[in-house]
Every structure is written in structure tokens, then in C-alpha cells.
Image: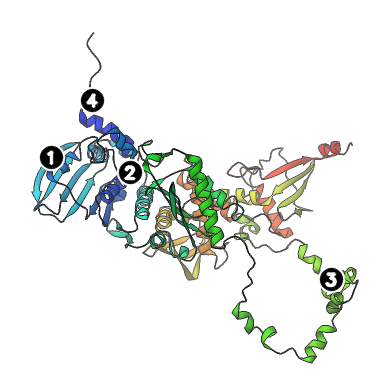
């Protein structure tokens, strides 16, 4: 029998290795930006076309490479960072394994121009499928320009797995932000299809955070800074009021390298304990510096997962530093004894307390109630206070956005065969609301206890599903269109969702520079709340984005339904309760929310009798 084991050709071996390092255009962006940082550049420009599928180019003003180094850089595991195994535990640079450029050259057409300060001419290289096609001297500025074109041109199966351009652009923006935030002393720019997305001037860390995440953080950042012999931590956390429903604006860096660590995130969440809701996430950009020998960054191809030698010390240090920062800046709830200057201008303070006013005040029953002895039991009977109990009665008016849709049964598809669990149609007479959260509706055999928010979520979800399947929701055009300004990442995301949002009654038009104009919105969105509705929808959408089993459209529908549903704690009129019950049991699936939570529970009369021994 002939021998069957053989060595793979270098180009195929490189393509296989590239699968670990270059998973999508954003992976190549990360590697090229980190190489530019390692080259000592203080000006780095990124250009992409078609979300990196046709072009990714990084131009830097770093130290450049010699002819030999330029060619050697594309060989597998060629690196200037490691000469022996001990060097792996002293890594202070971003790249070190020497596989990035080799992997890129295996799956793209690469053009490199580079020149050192001491050289008269630079060098130009063309590489395709790991083979050098051309090498020649050229005139070039000091630094390096590397362009990779037609990613995965020789691996079409990999190219087919790439997402849409907006989705891939979001991944690129994420990687760009992570590198740019770690090096605020470096100028960064990102240009996509000829349009500049980021222009980040050199500055302080705080300035870089505000440049990236938006001006709304400018006055809402708390500085964190602690230094010990073992490790240092510095950076910023957002004040509790900036907490969001998603983890979007959260960045941990170890020795200037972005990492993902559920362990450290848990430490930080503990530091915010009791200051924010359990379903909220604070903003943070924290940098940990410690001896490279105390951690292993070579545990994953993306180098985003690292292992600490002593995790418990790092955990305690992070938690303590953040707690100390929040306490130092008086973020914890306190009483403010400072007198507001504007109080001095109020009539009650500035105008004299005349004898006439004094006589009127002292003659009132309220005054006598609190000045005479043993009068506390008379307080409720005093005329001025006879309605004090009304403060504890359920509010009869609804304040939730989107509630008008419940009173218009025509917005939901026409009455269908009711698919209740026991095929009963609940009555809509004698409805009652409990705790401003539940609706009790009688049936022939007992009653249903309906959760109003879950029920409305189901109603909206089916309404939205019908809309995107071909029956768009009518939009009400605004007389005075609102302008919505977003961060770059949110703007890219909203652009991706625009077609489906149009079907759902939102007319949004890009207005340049990450700004959108809301020309119209669904009729049930209260005037003036259009911006809030879109912002909350984006937050909810990002919350669902971690769930890969849902399509983009499904995530949007679930986000809209959850965000616009009537919230628990809202008082409903009898008409609104009736509309909700009727619309719920007109749904195709009335008994559960899109996420599988029950919309109602059934209580049968015979079971109730048993509870009372009857």
C-alpha cells in the first residue's frame, strides 16, 4: 500500500491557518491597526470599501520596513517580537505571533508600500495566494501603506458566509473603536466608501471617550485611578444615570489590549450594586497595567481572552477601585445641604410675610392641627386633607407610549378563530385591574388573570409581523421633524434597520454625520416622543443582538414589541382593558409572548372551590 500522509502545500496551510485569525473583514482591520500601533505611528488612517470585502487599507507614519523585512513579514510565524519561549511571557506589544500578515496574504490580494527614514527609496510588494508577484523600489513617504483587496477571493465558501455590508461594517467599527480608545495619543480616522466615519484627534483618554461615545458622556464620567506595586488601574466609569439596558459601552483593557472578561465585568457590576437596576449596565472604559509575566495573552487566536495568574487579586482590585471612585465623587445617594441660589428668587422667600398673611396662615385648620397638642387623630377629618388617600388610589389615566393602538381594534387583524387553551372566549364585562398590572376577566368556568404588559407585547408583535409581511403601518408625518443624533455604532445599526422600520411606520432619513431626521412615526407614538422611541428601540435591539438564533428582522420585531408595550404599573380605563382583552384573544398565539412568557393564567371555579374546602 502506498503512503497516504503528505505535507500540505504552504498556500493551503496558510489558508487553513487564516481561518483562525481572519474570520471576517473586521479581523483583518484589527490586525492591521495593531501592526501600525506597534510600528510607533502617531497617525493611522483606515479606508474600507464594501465593508472591507473589496478593500481594507491602513496607512501609518510609523518606522516602516526594509526590503528584506517587508518580504519576511508575510512568512508564517515571522516576527521581531519573540526569539525564545520566555519572550511569550514578556509581551508588551499588540502583535507578536507573526501570523497576521501571512494569513491576510493567504486569503486576499495584498499591496504593500513601506519606507524607513534612513532609506532613500521604499519598497512595493504585490502578493496573491501567499505568492510574491512583484517587488520593486518606489518613492514613498516614511511609514507603511498596506491594502488588502477582494477578501476570500480564493475561498468563495468563506466569502459566502459573510453578513450584509451594514452588519460587517458594525464589526469593523467595533474593532476600530477598541484600538482607537486604547491609544488616545494617536490620531485615527476611518473612511468608508469615501465618506469619513471617524476623525479622532490626539488628546486625553476622556476626550477620546467623548469623541467615540458621544457628547452626552462629557459631564457624566467618573475618573478611576489606583496605583499599587502589583498593578495599576485607571480610566472612567459612567455615572449611574448613564446605565443602559445593553452592554454596548463597556471596555476593559489589559496592558492596552482590549479583552473580554465576564469575571472582571462581574467585579465592576458589584461595585455598582444598589446604584443601578439589575437589568442595567454601566458604561466603563478601564485600563489595567500589570507585569506581563502575571498573565497569559496567548490563550486564544484573537487575543481577546486572557488568563491572569491570580484572578482573585485582580477582581478585588477592580471592585475596590471603582467603589472608591464612586464614593470619592459622591455618586452614592446623599442629602444635598447646599442652598440653590434660585430659591432666593421665589415669592415665598423674597416677598415680606405681612401681618395679613400671618393671620390667614394661623387661622387655617391645617395650622391648628399641627400646633395644638393631641391633635394627630383629627388630621384625616380636616377639610384640606380629606383627599389624602387619593394619592394611593390607582391612576385612571394611561401614560404609556403606543397605548392608542389598543383602543383601535381595527389595527389588529380581523377577528379570527380564538386559539385559547381551553377554547373559551373570555368575557369583557366586569373587568377589574389589580395593582395596575393585571386584568381579571371572568369566563364560564372561572376567570383569567391577564398580565397587561405581556398581553400587549403579544398584540404588538403580531401587528408588527403583519406590517413587515406586506401591510405596512401608516405613518403620521410630523409638522416639525425631529433630528436624531447618534453615536457612530448606533448610526450604522439604524441604517441597517431603516427598510424594516419604514414598514413599521417610522420614516427616517439619513442627514449626514450620524444624524437622522424623523419625518414621520406611527400614529400611536405621542408627539415629541419620536426620538425617545427610536433610541429605546435601538437599545432593546442591541440587547437581543447576542442571540444568534434570531434573524435581524425577528430581533427588530421583538425589540419594538417589548419596548412599546404598556408597562406594569399603568392604570387603565375600562375601555382600554376591554380593547386589550379583545385584541389579545384575536391573536394567532394569545397565550404567550414572543419570548415564551405567559400572557395569562387560568383559574377554574372547581379548583377554587377545592381551595376553600367546598
- Judge left or right: residue 528 versus residue 146: right
- Which badge, 2 or 3, is on the more N-terminal residue? 2
The percent coordinates of residue 97 (x first, y second) are 28, 38
Q: Determine the CA span between mark 4 and mark 3.
A: 90 Å
Q: Determine the CA span between mark 1 and mark 4.
A: 21 Å
The percent coordinates of residue 450 (x first, y second) are 71, 48
- Which badge, 2 or 1, is on the more N-terminal residue? 2
The percent coordinates of residue 551 (x first, y second) are 46, 43
Pointer 1: what residue?
133
Count of labels shown?
Answer: 4
Label 4: few (<14), some or many (≥20) within 10 Å? Answer: few
The percent coordinates of residue 433 (x first, y second) are 75, 54
- Which badge, 4 or 2, is on the more N-terminal residue? 4
- Which badge, 4 or 3, is on the more N-terminal residue? 4
Answer yes or no: do the residues labelled 1 and 4 have beta carbons within 8 Å? no
Label 2: few (<14), some or many (≥20) within 10 Å? Answer: some
Answer yes or no: do the residues labelled 4 and 2 have beta carbons within 8 Å? no
**Residue at the outermost top position:** 1
Mark 2 or 3: in front is 2
The answer to whether residue 473 is seen in the rendering is no
Q: Nearer the viewer, residue 272 or 291?
A: 291
Q: Mark on residue 8? A: 4
- Which badge, 1 or 3, is on the more N-terminal residue? 1
Pointer 2: what residue?
27
Which of the 4 image quarters holds residue 309?
Answer: top left
**Residue at 12% from the left image edge and 48% from the top image edge:** 123
**Residue at 67% from the left image edge and 46% from the top image edge:** 585
Q: Determine the CA span between mark 4 and mark 2.
A: 25 Å
Of the 4 image quadrants, the one containing the C terminus is: top right
Pointer 3: what residue?
386
Q: Nearer the viewer, residue 456 or 100?
A: 100
Which of the 4 image quarters holds residue 340?
Answer: bottom right
Amino acid at each position: 500500500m502506498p503512503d497516504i500522509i503528505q505535507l500540505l502545500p504552504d498556500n493551503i496551510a496558510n489558508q487553513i491557518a487564516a481561518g483562525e485569525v481572519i474570520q471576517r473583514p473586521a479581523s483583518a482591520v484589527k490586525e492591521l491597526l495593531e501592526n501600525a500601533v506597534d510600528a510607533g505611528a502617531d497617525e493611522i488612517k483606515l479606508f474600507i470599501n464594501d465593508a472591507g470585502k473589496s478593500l481594507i487599507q491602513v496607512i501609518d507614519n510609523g518606522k516602516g520596513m526594509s526590503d528584506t523585512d517587508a518580504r519576511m513579514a508575510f512568512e508564517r510565524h515571522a516576527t521581531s517580537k519573540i526569539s525564545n519561549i520566555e519572550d511569550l511571557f514578556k509581551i508588551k506589544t499588540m502583535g507578536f505571533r507573526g501570523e497576521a500578515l501571512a494569513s491576510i496574504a493567504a486569503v486576499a490580494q495584498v499591496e504593500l508600500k513601506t519606507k524607513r527614514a534612513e532609506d532613500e527609496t521604499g519598497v512595493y510588494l504585490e502578493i496573491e495566494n501567499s505568492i510574491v508577484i512583484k517587488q520593486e523600489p518606489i518613492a514613498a513617504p516614511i511609514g507603511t501603506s498596506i491594502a488588502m483587496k477582494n477578501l476570500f477571493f480564493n475561498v468563495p465558501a468563506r466569502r459566502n458566509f459573510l453578513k450584509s455590508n451594514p452588519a460587517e461594517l458594525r464589526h469593523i467599527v467595533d474593532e476600530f473603536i477598541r484600538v482607537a480608545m486604547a491609544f488616545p495619543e494617536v490620531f485615527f480616522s476611518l473612511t468608508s466608501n469615501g465618506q469619513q466615519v471617524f476623525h479622532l484627534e490626539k488628546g486625553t483618554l476622556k476626550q477620546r471617550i467623548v469623541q467615540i461615545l458621544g457628547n452626552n458622556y462629557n459631564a457624566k464620567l467618573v475618573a478611576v485611578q489606583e496605583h499599587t506595586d502589583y498593578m495599576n488601574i485607571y480610566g472612567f466609569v459612567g455615572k449611574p444615570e448613564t446605565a443602559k439596558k445593553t452592554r454596548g459601552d463597556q471596555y476593559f483593557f489589559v496592558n492596552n489590549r482590549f479583552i473580554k472578561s465576564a469575571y472582571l465585568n462581574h467585579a465592576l457590576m458589584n461595585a455598582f450594586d444598589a446604584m443601578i437596576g439589575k437589568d442595567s449596565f454601566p458604561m466603563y472604559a478601564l485600563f489595567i497595567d500589570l507585569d506581563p509575566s502575571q498573565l497569559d495573552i496567548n490563550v486564544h487566536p484573537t487575543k481577546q481572552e486572557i488568563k491572569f495568574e491570580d484572578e482573585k487579586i485582580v477582581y478585588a482590585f477592580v471592585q475596590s477601585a471603582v467603589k472608591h471612585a464612586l464614593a470619592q465623587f459622591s455618586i452614592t445617594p446623599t442629602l444635598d445641604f447646599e442652598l440653590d441660589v434660585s430659591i432666593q428668587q421665589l415669592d415665598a422667600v423674597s416677598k415680606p410675610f405681612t401681618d395679613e398673611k400671618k393671620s390667614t396662615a394661623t387661622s387655617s385648620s391645617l395650622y391648628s392641627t399641627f400646633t395644638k397638642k393631641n391633635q394627630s387623630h383629627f388630621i384625616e377629618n380636616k377639610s384640606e386633607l380629606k383627599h389624602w388617600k387619593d394619592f394611593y388610589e390607582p391612576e385612571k389615566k394611561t401614560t404609556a407610549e403606543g397605548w392608542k393602538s389598543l383602543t383601535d381594534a381595527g389595527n389588529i387583524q380581523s377577528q379570527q378563530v380564538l386559539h385559547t387553551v381551553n377554547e373559551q372566549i373570555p368575557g369583557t364585562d366586569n373587568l377589574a385591574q389589580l395593582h395596575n398590572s393585571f386584568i381579571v376577566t371572568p369566563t364560564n368556568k372561572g376567570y383569567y388573570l391577564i398580565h397587561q404588559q405581556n398581553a400587549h407585547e403579544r398584540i404588538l408583535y403580531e401587528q408588527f409581523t403583519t406590517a413587515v409581511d406586506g401591510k405596512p403601518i401608516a405613518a403620521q408625518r410630523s409638522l416639525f421633524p425631529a433630528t436624531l443624533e447618534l453615536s457612530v455604532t448606533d448610526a450604522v445599526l439604524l441604517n441597517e434597520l431603516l427598510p424594516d422600520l419604514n414598514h413599521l411606520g417610522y420614516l427616517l432619513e439619513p442627514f449626514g454625520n450620524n444624524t437622522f431626521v424623523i419625518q414621520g412615526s406611527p400614529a400611536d407614538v405621542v408627539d415629541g416622543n419620536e426620538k425617545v422611541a427610536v433610541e429605546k428601540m435601538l437599545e432593546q435591539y442591541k440587547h437581543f443582538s447576542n442571540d444568534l438564533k434570531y434573524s435581524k428582522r425577528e430581533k427588530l420585531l421583538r425589540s419594538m414589541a417589548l419596548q412599546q408595550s404598556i408597562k406594569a404599573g399603568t392604570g387603565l380605563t375600562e375601555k382600554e382593558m376591554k380593547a386589550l382583552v379583545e385584541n389579545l384573544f384575536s391573536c394567532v398565539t394569545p397565550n404567550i409572548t414572543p419570548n415564551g412568557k405567559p400572557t395569562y393564567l387560568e383559574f377554574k371555579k372547581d379548583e377554587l372551590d377545592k381551595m376553600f374546602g367546598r
